[in-house]
Amino acid sequence: MSDLDLDGELTIYTAAEQAPRVLGPLERTASIRVGLAGVTEMDTAGLQILLAARREAERLGGTAEFRGASEPVREALAIVHLDGALRPVEHGEPRSTQGPA
């Protein structure tokens, strides 16, 4: 499993540089753990990157785990009602391997 901590913006303005950072490790391993505590702003482009990572990991037979969501991440997930589907795992919390249908 690859570990990656994101920081700064995860928006339309940074999507072109952030998408390869998030999706690239999936070329080497089928699972990724993405830390979101340092994300200061997130929009739908950022959400698309996270969804693409989860979809690609599942396609490869792995998982994408999101952890330590900052307040901007939690707000963005709640606005589009993905807070349950992409619910970040907090430190020490058991991992769930189930995603939405």
Image (cartoon, rainbow, N blue to C red):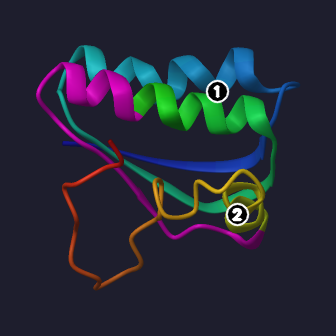
Q: Residue at x 59, y 67 (%)?
A: 69
57 drawn magenta:
yes
Amino acid under disc 2: Ala
Quadrant into which the C terminus falls: top left
Residue 39 magenta: no
* Mark 2 crowdedness (10 Å alpha carbons): few <14, some 14-19, many ≥20: some
- Res 57 → quadrant: top left
Q: Which mark is residue 18?
A: 1
The quadrant in which the N terminus is found is top left
Instruction: Read off the magenta span.
Output: 54-71
Give the residue at the far front of this rendering. Answer: 101
Q: Which residue is mark 2?
A: 78
Query: Is residue 74 rendered to the left or right of residue 42?
Result: left
In three-dimensional space, the C-alpha distance between marks 2 and 1, rounded to whole angstroms, equals 22 Å
Element at label 1 = helix
CB within 8 Å, label 2 to label 1: no
User: How far across and down, in percent of the image, does residue 11 sit?
Assistant: 81, 35
Q: Earlier in the sequence, mark 2 or mark 1?
A: 1
Residue 94 sits in which quadrant? bottom left
